[in-house]
Structure formats: structure tokens, C-alpha cells
């Protein structure tokens, strides 16, 4: 073996010894993992198996006979008399039973159709203010001019501008009206189609200044008191619904109801009266010209009624000419009306040329009407519009006559909100609510149908709760 091989073997031996020494050192210094001893096993608690528990039945009460109770208490008891035996009534034959049930059903239906609804809901009456308190501060009104926001155009129905009927302040409505549904702020404004009468309701968040109507009231609802809205005097009537402030009055079961359909109303059709009374005097130049126009249209009835009536017609024509020439020449005074009425009262006419006493031209005789009744009906119409604008425009005698009459008419014809007092065909009180009921009213110049019915605006309670008034439907009653 040469020297090179010897050196290589020596180096290899040294390397192996070095590796063995390094491995032994690492083995002694390596990290050791400590074993965590296990927790001792808990002794399992022995429990009895759960068995289904049977429901304990209630122990029935035992009724002790009076005699046994007496023996227990050692007190005597009187023997109980036996109940008398009452034989049962024989069952009616099938035919008789059916007749009885039919009779009972008919009676129930008749009571439901005629009797009032027995409920505890609240209703609202829109009571016209008579006399007026403060028209400026009034929040709710019927007719006249609506208070619309400036940005809102005049409402249209089927493309036609509607007639304004009412504007009610929601804040004045009782909280339990309509089952508590609907708005309690803002205003509800009502408009009707001038030709069909179909109505809509708008909920206004704010109001505005009074706005004049773009046209006169249409024929669908408009009808002044006394029938002056038709015939040859229709052009002389005020073509508008009077602007009447109203109070919102809640009526609950047991409360006194301001609505009184038995109020006397206007009974002048069959009355004998004289318009020379200051209560019927014209109150401005317009009403004086109105009287002249009515008289002028009826003078032809006098011309063919004999010499006395022809003379009366000639004298009346002179007074009519004087009124037309003097109108607006100076401020109107009550003395002007008094002078004219005195001159007309001095004229005599004979209703029957053959017999009968002569009457003053200012006297109304129901058996022979000439012109006085038409004048009074038109004066009634003009007076209420003037009074609503400014009560001082009427004289004290006129107010003393008209205001009680208007109160009676208002009580008979009062508008309402809430459920009807009687069952209403086509109305479901469980799912619907009556927003407004507008009956025929001579005071408000309204007529619904040919038999003096009412106009009702009905909405589903679901739509009312959602504030959606676009689906309000119109219902007319007789």
C-alpha cells in the first residue's frame, strides 16, 4: 500500500469519527416533548330512565245530595218536591216549520232594511255656521272657492275642470273616524264633474289663497232652492255653490245629533205673505235690478186681465223703468228699497176678474201666484251668497228672517262623514268607508237625482290606510 492510500484511509476514518461524535452530541441535547397526563375518568352518575308521565285528570266535583249533607251535619232537611211533568210540545210538520223559518227570515231582513245600524262608531256632521263666527279663520267649508296650493292646477275629471264641492281640514277629524284610518293633517278637497257628477277627492298637504272657479257650476248637481235654477229665471240665479264655513262635529252613540231631518225647513210655498215687509226688501242695486227683472217678465199676465190689471201693469212698468235708470247712479241705501216697495204695494191687481178682492202687487196669494214667489226665491239665493261673503250686507230684518230659515234647512240637509245610519245597497261596511255624504240641499244649491237623494264618496279601507284616494267611487242614493 503506498502513502496515498494510507492518507485517504486515515482521512475517511477521521471523518466518520467526527460525524459519530456530532450525532452523539445532538442526541443528548435534542428537545424533549413532555407528555400531559390524562385526566382521571369521571365516574358516570347513575340516573333512572325517564318514563313518560301520564296527564293527571281533573277530579270531578261530587255533588252531595241535600239529604246526605243533612245526615252529615246532623240537621234535618225538608223533602224535595218532585218536579211536575210537562209533556214536550209536538214537533211541527215540515211544511209548517219551513213557513216559520221563512217568516223569521223576512222579519230579520225587514228590520235590517228599515232600522238603524246598531254600532258604536263615530260619525261626523259638517254643521254650517249660522251665524258666521270668523270666516277668515275657518278651516273647513262647503262650496265657494277652494284653497289650493299655488303650484296646483285646477283639478280635472275626464279632462274637464271640476266643480268645487268641499274642503275639510283633516286635523279637525276625530281620531277614531274610519277606524282610525286616513290622514289627520292637510285637507281633503272634493270636486265633481259638471255634467256627470262623478266626484274625486284630493289630499292636499297645504292650502293656499282662495281661488275663483274657472266657470259656473254645471247641471249635474247644481240646483238652487225654490227651483229657480230651471225655466226662464235660471239666468237670474247665482251660478255657484255658496261658500259656507262649517264646523266638524263628532257624533258618537248617546250624543245629541245636530242633524235633524224633522226640522220644518221652508214652508213658504203655501204661505200668504207680502214682500213689502222689510225682511224681503232688496239689499243692494243688484238685488233691486233682480226684482225689476222678475216683475217685468210677469207683467204680460196682467195685460189681459181687465182694466184694473192693465192699469196695474202700466204703473209697474213705470217703476221698473225708474229702477233701471237710477241703478248705480248713487250708492244704494235702504231708503231706495223702501220707496220702491211702498210704490209697488200701492198698486192693486185682481187675481180673478170676475170676482174676488184686489190685492197689493207685493202680496203673494198661493191660489193665484203672479211674481212675488219667484222674486222671493231669487232673493233667497242672492241673499245667502251675499251673507256668506259679508253678513253685514243684509239688513237686520232680513237676517232675522233668513238666518232661522237657513238653520232649519241646514239641520235637514247636513253633510256627513263616516258610516251611514241605515244599510246602504252596494256598500260593504267591513271593507269600505264613506269619506263624505252630500245630500240634496236647497241651502247649498245641490240636488242629487230626481228624488232628492245623496251623493256618497266611498273608498276601500285598504286604500284609505295607504293614503291612495285615486280609487274613490261615487255612489248615489235616492
Image: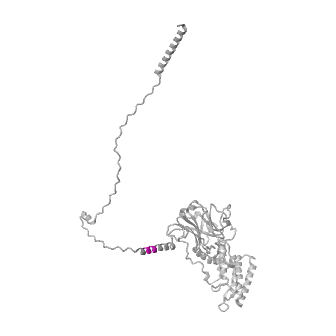
Instruction: Please state if 219 lies on the left or on the right of 172 as rendered.
Output: right
Outermost residue, bottom side: 354
Can residue 361 be seen in the rendering of this structure? Answer: yes
- Answer above or below: position of 297 versus 477: below
* Coloring applied to the structure: one colour
- Residue 297 place in picture, x, y as percent: 71, 82
Closest to the observer, 328 or 116 = 116
Tell me the quarter of the picture where residue 143 sits. Answer: bottom right
Q: What residue is shown at x 71% (from left), y 78% (from top)?
A: 289
Tell whether position 100 is magenta.
yes
Q: What residue is shown at x 62% (from left), y 78% (from top)?
A: 401
Outermost residue, front side: 1
Outermost residue, top side: 2
- Answer above or below: position of 131 versus 41: below
Tell whether position 29 is magenta.
no
**Number of numbered discs visible in the structure rendering:** 0
- Residue 59 place in picture, x, y as percent: 32, 58
Q: Main secondary structure of the magenta part?
A: helix
Closest to the observer, 122 or 389 = 122
- Answer above or below: position of 49 versus 33: below
Instruction: Please state if 179 lies on the left or on the right of 366 as rendered.
Output: left
- Which quarter of the rendering shows the C terminus? bottom right
Tell me the quarter of the picture where residue 394 sits. Answer: bottom right
- Residue 219 place in picture, x, y as percent: 66, 73
Q: What residue is shown at x 31% (from left), y 73% (from top)?
A: 85
- Residue 254 place in picture, x, y as percent: 50, 70
Can residue 282 be seen in the rendering of this structure? Answer: no
- Which region shows up in magenta? 97-103
Tell me the quarter of the picture where residue 200 sits. Answer: bottom right
Amino acid at each position: 500500500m503506498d502513502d496515498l492510500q494510507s492518507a485517504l484511509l486515515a482521512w475517511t476514518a477521521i471523518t466518520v469519527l467526527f460525524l459519530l461524535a456530532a450525532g452523539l452530541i445532538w442526541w443528548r441535547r435534542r428537545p424533549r416533548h413532555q407528555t400531559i397526563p390524562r385526566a382521571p375518568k369521571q365516574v358516570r352518575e347513575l340516573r333512572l330512565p325517564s318514563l313518560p308521565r301520564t296527564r293527571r285528570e281533573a277530579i270531578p266535583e261530587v255533588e252531595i245530595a241535600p239529604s246526605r249533607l243533612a245526615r252529615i251535619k246532623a240537621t234535618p232537611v225538608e223533602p224535595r218536591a218532585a218536579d211536575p211533568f210537562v209533556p214536550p210540545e209536538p214537533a211541527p210538520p215540515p211544511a209548517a216549520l219551513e213557513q216559520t223559518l221563512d217568516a223569521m227570515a223576512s222579519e230579520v231582513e225587514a228590520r235590517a232594511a228599515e232600522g238603524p245600524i246598531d254600532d258604536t262608531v263615530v260619525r261626523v256632521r259638517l254643521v254650517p255656521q249660522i251665524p258666521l263666527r270668523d270666516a277668515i279663520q275657518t278651516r273647513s267649508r262647503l262650496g265657494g272657492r277652494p284653497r289650493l296650493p299655488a303650484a296646483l292646477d285646477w283639478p280635472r275629471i275626464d279632462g274637464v275642470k271640476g266643480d268645487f264641492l268641499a274642503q275639510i281640514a283633516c286635523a279637525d277629524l276625530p281620531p277614531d273616524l274610519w277606524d282610525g284610518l286616513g290622514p289627520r293633517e292637510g285637507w281633503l278637497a272634493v270636486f265633481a264633474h259638471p255634467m256627470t257628477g262623478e266626484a274625486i277627492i284630493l289630499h292636499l298637504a297645504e292650502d293656499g289663497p282662495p281661488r275663483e272657479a274657472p266657470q259656473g257650476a254645471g247641471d249635474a248637481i247644481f240646483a238652487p232652492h225654490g227651483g229657480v235654477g230651471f225655466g226662464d229665471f235660471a239666468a237670474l240665479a247665482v251660478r255657484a255653490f255658496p261658500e259656507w264655513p262649517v264646523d266638524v262635529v263628532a257624533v258618537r252613540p248617546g250624543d245629541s245629533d245636530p242633524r235633524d231631518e224633522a226640522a220644518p225647513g221652508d214652508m213658504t210655498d203655501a204661505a200668504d205673505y207680502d214682500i213689502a215687509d222689510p225682511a224681503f226688501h232688496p239689499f243692494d242695486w243688484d238685488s233691486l235690478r233682480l226684482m225689476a227683472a222678475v216683475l217685468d217678465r210677469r207683467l204680460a199676465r196682467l195685460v189681459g186681465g181687465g182694466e184694473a190689471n192693465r192699469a196695474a201693469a202700466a204703473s209697474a212698468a213705470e217703476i221698473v223703468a225708474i229702477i233701471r235708470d237710477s241703478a248705480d247712479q248713487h250708492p244704494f241705501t235702504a231708503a231706495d228699497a223702501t220707496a220702491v216697495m211702498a210704490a209697488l204695494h200701492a198698486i192693486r191687481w185682481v187675481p180673478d176678474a170676475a170676482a174676488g178682492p184686489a190685492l197689493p202687487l207685493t202680496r203673494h196669494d198661493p191660489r193665484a201666484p203672479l211674481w212675488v214667489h219667484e222674486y222671493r226665491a231669487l232673493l233667497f239665493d242672492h241673499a245667502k251668497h251675499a251673507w256668506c261673503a259679508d253678513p253685514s250686507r243684509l239688513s237686520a230684518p232680513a237676517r232675522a228672517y233668513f238666518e232661522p230659515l237657513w238653520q232649519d234647512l241646514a239641520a235637514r240637509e247636513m253633510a256627513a262623514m263616516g258610516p251611514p245610519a241605515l244599510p246602504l245597497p252596494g256598500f260593504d261596511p267591513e271593507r269600505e268607508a264613506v269619506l263624505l255624504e252630500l245630500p240634496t240641499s236647497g241651502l247649498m244649491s245641490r240636488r242629487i237625482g230626481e228624488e232628492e237623494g245623496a251623493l256618497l264618496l266611498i273608498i276601500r279601507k285598504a286604500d284609505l290606510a295607504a293614503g291612495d284616494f285615486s280609487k274613490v267611487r261615487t255612489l248615489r242614493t235616492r
